[in-house]
Amino acid sequence: MKNLSGSNLEYTLASGVFAVTAEVGPPKGPDAGEVKEKAAVLKGFADAYNVTDNQTAVVRMSSIAASKILYDQGLEPIMQIVCRDRNRIAIQSDLLGAHALGLRNVLCLSGDHQSAGAGGKLNGHPGAKNVFDIDSIQLISIVKGLGKGIQESGDPISPAAPFFIGAAWTPFGPPEKFRTIRLKKKIDAGANFIQTQAVYDIKRFAEAMRRAEDMGLTEKAAILPGIIVPRSAGMLNYMNANVPGIEVPDEMIQRMKDAQHPKVEGIKITLELVDAVKNLSGVKGVHLQAIEAEGLLPDIINEAGLLPRP
Amino acid sequence: MIFAEWKPIDELVEKLKAHKKVLLVGCATCVAECAAGGEKEVETLAPLLSMALKKQGCSVEIITATLEKQCEFEFVEELIEKGHDVDAVMSLACGIGVQAMADLFDPIPVYPGVNTSALTIREEAGLWAGRCAACGDCVLGETFGLCPIARCAKSLLNGPCGGTRGNGKCEVSEDTDCIWNLIVERGDERGQLDSLAEVKKSKNWSNSRHGGPKRVIREDLR
Amino acid sequence: MSNQQSTDVTKVVVLYCQQAISEGAKSTDWAQDAEGINVQAIMLPCSSKVEVPYILRFLESGADAVEIVACPEKGCSFLIGSRRAEKRIEYVRGLLESIGDNPQRVGISRKLSQTPDELIAIAKARAEAANSN
Ligand code: SF4
Ligand code: SF4
């Protein structure tokens, strides 16, 4: 892998270091201080930080603005872009703006449907008109094109705007036999790194990785399995039942149920998962999340032996 | 067929309150098939509106008619005489029919009595489901006859999003199939999954509403 | 309901399936014997013939209540006729609710061989339900 974009994540991966990414969700209000606080907690513990784009269709500070705030704090952002809210004109315009601001990583996603509204916990905007002018794979092609100095239309730009391009992979979502093909499409379109839906079932994930490897995909893109720190048996149960593409083995749920201190057990499980995916061929890093508990991550990353970051 | 459903009665009553004599018009085509604006629905809505208006102290005479087709001027013209003394029209046809009426009855107000919302098929008695969104660039030939534009909540062209539920339903509704799950299944059954492996380029939407109002001229038919 | 002319006698239309009644109710004369309410009796070959607009027209043109007397599901000689009538009543109730009216203005009873007395009792019960609430 050549470092074309100037992304630090790209450099880390190219140099063969096991990468760590984490997530910083922008606030629902306009306070830059909130972003800075989260940044202060996580600074130095990951190579790059995903900044979500109106996740679950809830209006939040724009991913481009929050990314810039992180950048100014010395953290490298991965700006997420969903296809729900902007057409190819707006997205390309934002990409050029992001590049001008120094942002170099983008993660291309379809985006939750606007009916999601934080799973019913907030009003959200179910009456919104969605865009979906392009899909996530077409978005990858477009980002790739800007890197070569060509807009989607074919019009040239100068200079080019190279990005380090990310995409998502849900290996266990139905139709399962298509999920590796879809991963290949993303990589064919230009994805350089892949963050997966949260993995708990190592055996099944290992099989999925083998399929990806057999198709030569692990050589073309860096795969970073997602791991969400489990906090309780209830949370695992909920994700297992309700979050598409997340599968939690029964033993793990039982283990959390039996644990005297579920939170401690959750951290132990996380460390075991990190260890397990580290040993899988083709895995180039991890994407760690601790929902509403980012403060846990520094210790976990430390204990996993992933410090110091390059 | 074009699918429509009644607007909330309150909204209709609000529109008709100030009028004296109203022509309520149905259409015997699509809206009859989806049981929103055929003769039966016209004859149901007329007494219901009368009762609702009476409750609000309004005396509005409602006369009714159902045209064979409200989306063609020749048929709509038949109504001009019947409606010569009305001060409002309410149409239960799709948006096309409503506008045909509005053109011919101008300046008399023509109100829509239904919301036109989709192009559907009747899957079984009392169950309609969307099939087409008139995107102007049909891809059914590449998706084994299943439309990813109208039937995928995100109009995806390159396969399923990460939201497909474990049971193959779409993330937006427990009752709706993830169409990409079905497209892949059908492709797999035909041994043609490979054809879905190629990256589909961004779509050209300009032959649909996105390209501006549709206007087509066929010289051979003029 | 208050907006029906409460001073007048309650008017009930009874639409009855000829299969659902006893010999004694084969003519519509029994309707005259109903005391305290005004019954309009209409005999039908089958309750499945009762369409929604037909029911609503009665309500609109002055009836306080409409009752369908149908055969029980198993006794229906057209098999699904009485079930259909029931669904229509449910639908009309929804419509009445949508305009803020009393859904109990319409109803359906299903039993074989109803006598004139039973029919009158049914009509009275419907009148009461229509006037309450
Ligand atoms: S691809 Fe377009 S034209 Fe074809 S069925 Fe779907 S919406 Fe209609
Ligand atoms: S779950 Fe399937 S149908 Fe629903 S939005 Fe995703 S791909 Fe489209």
Image (spheres, coloured by chain):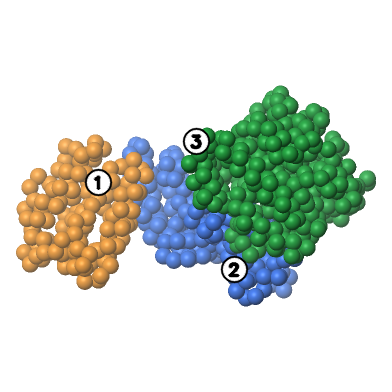
Can you tell me whether the CB of the residue at mark 2 lies under 8 Å from the nearest atom of ligand 2? no
Q: Nearer the viewer, mark 2 or mark 3?
A: 3
Decide if residue B203 is on the left or right side of residue C45.
right
* Numbered badge on residue A260: 3
Amino acid type for the residue under numbered disc 2:
Glu
Task: Work out whether residue C78 or residue B32 is closer to the camera in this orientation and state it.
Answer: C78
Distance, label 2 to label 3, CA atoms, is 45 Å
Give residue C104's mark.
Answer: 1
Residue at the spot 46% in from the left edge and 42% down from the top edge = B11
- At horizontal 64% and vertical 46% (from top left) the residue drawn is A273
Give the total of numbered labels: 3
Q: Nearer the viewer, mark 1 or mark 3?
A: 3
Chain that the image shows in blue: B
Asked if both marks, 1 and 3, belong to the same chain, the answer given is: no
Q: Is mark 1 within 8 Å of ligand 2?
A: no
| Display colour for chain A | green
Task: Return the residue nearer the eye: A27 or B213.
Answer: A27
Point 8% across, 51% down: residue: C34
